[in-house]
Amino acid sequence: MRMMLRISVPTVEGNKALKDGSMGKFIEHTLSDLKPEAAYFTAEKGQRTAYLFVDIKDSSDMPHFGERFFLAFNAAVDFVPVMNADELKKGLPKALAGIG
């Protein structure tokens, strides 16, 4: 299932990782390992935040995707199921069939 991971890094931990050079290496390794469909980086509510769009085949794979952020940065990680336009197009007729 396609998931959006929202990863928010607390300022103190993020500053430390940025200053010691580990953040860049971590991001590079993580993107190579997780192979997200897309990755975006921003600031949200005053914290460094990343949005990664990944395919998670089974819920038992969630620790593989999330634990690294908890351990490296004491980050908050949210898993949000998402769909692309083709999946929405496929799902809308099913929704309409259930209404009528």
Image: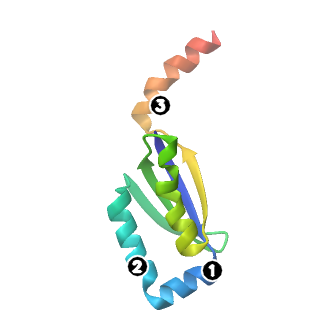
Q: Secondary structure at mark 3?
A: helix
Query: Please, what secondary structure does the residue beneath circle 2 have?
Result: helix
Residue 71 in the image: above or below residue 88? below
Residue type at numbered disc 2: Gly
Sooner in the amino-acid sequence: mark 2 or mark 3 = 2
Where 12 falls versus 90 (above or below)?
A: below
Residue at 57 percent across and 50 percent down: it is 79
Nearer to the camera, 74 or 80: 74
Q: Which mark is residue 24?
A: 2
Separation of disc 1 and disc 2 at Cα? 15 Å
Under circle 1, the secondary element is: helix
Residue 42 appears in the figure? yes
**Residue at 47% in and 90% down:** 20
**Would residue 49 be visible to someone looking at this image?**
no
User: Which tag is nearer the camera, tag 1 or tag 3?
Assistant: 1
Q: List the residue tagged with mark 3.
A: 88
Residue marked by disc 1: 11
Q: Disc 1 and disc 3: Cα gap in Å?
A: 36 Å
Establish if 75 lies above or below 16.
above
Residue 58 % position (x, y): 47, 40
In this view, the mark in front (2 or 3): 2
